[in-house]
Image (cartoon, coloured by chain):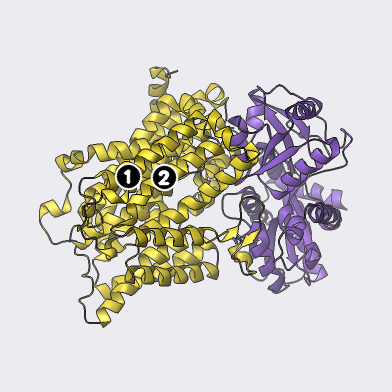
Chain colours: A purple, B yellow
Amino acid sequence: MANLKTCVFSLCMVALTPTVAVAAECPEGYPDGPITFRVGYGAGGGTDAVARKVASLIEEQAGWTVVVENRPGASGGVMATELMREDADGSIVGVASNTTLAINPWDNPDTVYTYEDFRYMGTGMLLNYGLVALKDKPYDTLEEFIAAVEEMGRGTVSVGAASHEIAVRAIADHFGVNLVPIPGKGSAAALQEALGGHVDATVQSTQHVPQIKAGKMVQLATLTDTRAVYAPDVPTLKEEGLDVSIEGHIFFMLPKDTPDDIHACLSETLAEATSSEAYGEFMAKLETEAMNMGPDGTRDWLEEASAFYKESLSGEQ
Amino acid sequence: MLPDPSLITNGLVEAFTLSNLLFILAGVAIGQIVGATPGLSIIMALAIAIPLTFGFDTLTAIAFLISVNKGGTIGGAVPSILINVPGTPESAATALDGHPMAKKGRPLKAMKYALYYSVTGDFLSDVVLILVAAPLAVVALKMGPIEITALMILAFTVISGLVGESLLKGLTAAALGFLCASIGLDPGTATPRFTFGMLELYDGLELTALSIGTLAMSEILYNIVGARKGKPSAAPIRVSGGTRSDRTVTFREYLANRYVALRAFVLGTSIGAIPGLGSTTAGFLSYSVTKQAARDPEAFGTGDPRGIAASETANSAVVGANLIPLLTLGIPGNIAAALLVSAFMIHGVQPGPLLFEEQGNLIYGMFGAMLIANLCNLAVGQVGMRFWAMIVSAPASVVFSGAMLLCFTGSYVIAGGVFGIYVMIGSAVLGYLMRAFGLSIVAFIVAFILTPELEGAIVSSRLITGDDPWAILSHPIALALLALSVVSIIYLGPWRRTPGAQEDPEKT
């Protein structure tokens, strides 16, 4: 069925049919107005860029009007709290990150929701996090890095997000070394500190890729389940014997009581957008992978990630 | 290290096509309009414009986006000068002298000063970018958390001179700035401070909403209260009146502030080359330094062209300089630059160490486009200013209510919701009280802007050095900056002020 659907869709693309190709099954009369994508981050971030791309693809493919709004604050927490109170009629879609849903509830005492308070249409993108260091440093692999840290007594790793910090602590625990995460204003600031040689390594998602291509930085380990598209020869933490996986995802979510038919319609519409060729090209340009885990897969992933972060964060306090 | 001159001329030729020119003009015009509308930020304009450029040729797309950004830096000064509502946060320092000059019946002159110095700063920093981007980026990278801590300490000693006549009042204003800046998650452990359970406060108070509230809304309130007490309300800004010299800036007048502009350009370019510090810091810092170094600091705040030159040259110099870390290292210096990175990547161009080798033609084409955009900025600005000035020559009742409306919509849009309006109103009340008690609002805002930078840098420094204070001995740049701070306290400190020179609290 799914194959047939994408097949029909790609045929439409080939024939350049000007008529609207709605392959998703939607309830009669839905949507009866514009749909709003409410992004939990400010204009200009990665989440915002993905939301806008998906919105424009849905407008093209389904012929709907999709408005993108930004509701920044507390790593998506402001948006998620608001979304809980919205009408569950499918007119508002929240766009959030793994920090919003899997970390905020355990990290911030004022978060009033958990991942279980929403329904999910799916995800848009997989960010491959990596532990990277300057090429000039005397280590090129995780083992060499750990050995160097042991020798120095302590090592510093600049990080741009809470999940990166957790990854660094997990690595330190596993190998029994003193690694200090240096929190900063984001990945760009973390990269800057590493490039200037002020820290021993950094956790990055994609901003460091040009540095790797130029031979100025080396990826010591990939923190996701699978190897990174930009560093296929670098092993993951799991391959190194450490059962930790830190991934970045972008989530499309709805209020919890959204009816099944609308939820199905929106999930299928999202799947069409994220499986399109145009979307794949967009992701490749951002050095990331298009990945839609689907409504059930998303929920399963969040359940697991949520449990992992809950444990990591409670151990810290 | 200098690039081949033929590369630069080739770039200019490549940029100089009719369609590029049209898009640069359109970009500059859009940028100026967006910048001149308080609450519409250049960031939003860029985020919306990027998808529009998907279909363009790469050079055209980049040229268009950079033009929007450049136009915005000039547009922001317009409402700062005319109605004392900063169109963009970085133009808040321009309001300090620009608005008083406008109130004296010379709004066009003030805007022209802003335009000329803004284009000057922008142009000069573009030249620096084109000529010495790579070596400068390497130097800027040496500024780690420890050096930034020292730099921020130096910045604080410079602004300590802003406190005005009473040291106590000035420090009180700065302390309020510290307090407001500490709202939100602390940079080290992400513990919420002063958030009272509100997620909206986790990221701190929004700078634009805060500056619109304290600078603009409080001024409107002050005027309204003054009018009710029978004081003559601030006269509406007259545009058509006055002599020719009230409407134009002669070349001689422009050159009179060349040293101020030059210093502001050096400051703006240096701050722009260090990722993360931003144009608001540059504008206020340059204004403070200029005021402190002047023989007659009390003239500032009354419509002194040096104030406009200091602020505008510096904040515009950041725009070109911000591209230095972006192009050579792939590190965006601010959000506008981050958006440009995503635009580059969407067009298949990766900023970073290989950019100049792989995409030399494109980059020099872009440099050509930047120089053309500066000229367009000047031309569009000349025409646009008459138009803007006409709008505010309406009666005070209309201007005040219009400005108030902009304060509200601006805070709503920029903070993404009603919460921004609450912040703006709260800051307006605070600003009103500060005016009433003669506390410097500028010292307050500068402290608010610099505190997060200082705190973040201190936290990182402590973690990196493992709380070892002697580690600073291996950081010569930081030591030099700290030594400069001592010099700055001695030579620019508040005790240098001649006693008796009264400063009007309303002006600061």
Q: Position of residue B193 (x, y in %)?
A: 61, 62
A115 shown above or below B461: below
- What amino acid type is highlighted by mark number 1? Val
Using a 10 Å C-alpha cutoff, classify the residue at mark 1 as few (fewer than 14 neighbours), some (14 to 19) or many (20 or more). many
- The residue under the point 64% across, 55% down is A55
- The subunit carrying tag 1 is B
Residue under label 1, please give it.
Answer: B289
Discs 1 and 2 share one subunit: yes
Q: Residue at x 67, y 55 (%)?
A: A58
> Which mark, residue B155?
2
Tell me if residue A293 can be seen. Answer: yes
> Which circle's residue, 1 or 2, is located before the other in the chain?
2
Element at label 2: helix
Dots 1, 2 in contact, CB < 8 A: no
Percent coordinates x, y for residue B444 in the rendering? 41, 59
Residue A26's disc number: none
Residue under the point 57% across and 49% down = A44
Name the foreground residue: B316 vs B297: B297
Q: Using the numbered discs, state the Cα–Cα distance from disc 1 to disc 2 in whole angstroms.
A: 9 Å
> Which amino acid lies under the numbered mark 2 shown in the image of this protein?
Ala
The percent coordinates of residue A241 (x first, y second) are 89, 35
Say which quarter of the image contains residue B282: top left
For label 2, the crowd category at 10 Å Cα-Cα, with few meaning under 14, some 14 to 19 and many 20 or more, is many
